[in-house]
């Protein structure tokens, strides 16, 4: 297997112990809802461990269960699968009407949405590649690019970013 997507190199995570982590990064640790998380993945693996906003903490946005993204304790948890031809994953997390709301898109198409009951959100030492620094799962796959934006994008902005990333990485976007 080659670590390339669209003719460009990607980062491979082995599903065991690989992770990227920014410890004590004031800008990343200050992220609160709303947030837009964008990732470009290069295979159809389970997204478990792709991102954990605050390993071991309550109220964290993360890819925790098989083929799902959640705010801790599944409040809410929504379905999200990746595809082998490459996925542009966009997940928005916001407080809407005093509740946490997640919406997931893949390659330009909304996949799922869900609403929880709490309004807290924690971001401390965010990690790419593992959940709870590996004790609850690790991402097994290739990542080409990740973006964190400190607001929810409107549909036009999201579509423009998805189209740009699709052209850049050679992924079909609807």
Image: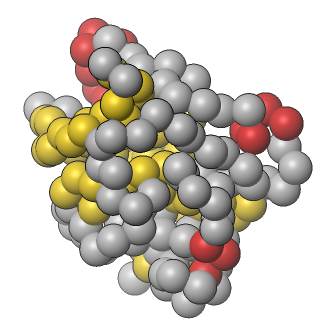
Q: Identify the residue at image location x=23%, y=52%.
A: 78
Query: In this figure, which colouring scheme has been used for the structure?
Result: secondary structure
Give the image location of residue 174, x and y in percent. Answer: 12, 32
Q: Identify the residue at image location x=37%, y=24%.
A: 98
Asked whether residue 27 appears in the rendered view, the answer is: yes
In this rendering, position of residue 114 left or right of residue 132? left
Q: In the image as oriented, which residue stretches furthest toward the bottom?
A: 16
In the picture, the quarter occupied by the N terminus is bottom left
Looking at the image, residue 62 lies above or below residue 131: above
Looking at the image, residue 161 lies above or below residue 7: above
Quarter of the view holding residue 20: bottom right
Q: Nearer the viewer, residue 53 or 129?
A: 53
In this rendering, position of residue 25 left or right of residue 160? right
Give the image location of residue 118, x and y in percent. Answer: 41, 40
Asked whether residue 172 appears in the rendered view, the answer is: no
Q: How many marks?
A: 0
Give the image location of residue 94, x and y in percent. Answer: 40, 27
Quarter of the view holding residue 117: top left
Give the image location of residue 25, x and y in percent. Answer: 84, 43
Q: Identify the residue at image location x=15%, y=36%.
A: 110
Looking at the image, residue 20 lies above or below residue 156: below
Q: Nearer the viewer, residue 86 or 124?
A: 124
Looking at the image, residue 153 lies above or below residue 1: above
């Amino acid at each position: 297997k080659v670590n390339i997507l669209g003719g460009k190199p990607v980062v491979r995570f082995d599903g065991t112990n690989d992770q990227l982590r920014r410890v004590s990064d004031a800008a990343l640790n200050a992220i609160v809802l709303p947030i837009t998380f964008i990732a470009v993945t290069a295979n159809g693996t389970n997204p478990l461990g792709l991102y954990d906003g605050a390993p071991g903490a309550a109220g964290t946005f993360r890819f925790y269960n098989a083929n799902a993204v959640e705010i801790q304790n599944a409040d809410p948890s929504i379905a999200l699968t990746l595809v082998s031809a490459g996925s542009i994953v966009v997940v928005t997390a916001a407080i809407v009407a005093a509740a946490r709301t997640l919406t997931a898109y893949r390659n330009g198409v909304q996949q799922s949405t869900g609403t929880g009951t709490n309004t807290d959100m924690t971001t401390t030492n965010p990690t790419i590649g593992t959940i709870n620094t590996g004790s609850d799962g690790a991402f097994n796959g290739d990542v080409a690019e990740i973006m964190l934006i400190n607001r929810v994008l409107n549909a036009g902005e999201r579509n423009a970013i998805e189209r740009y990333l699709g052209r850049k990485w050679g992924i079909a976007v609807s």
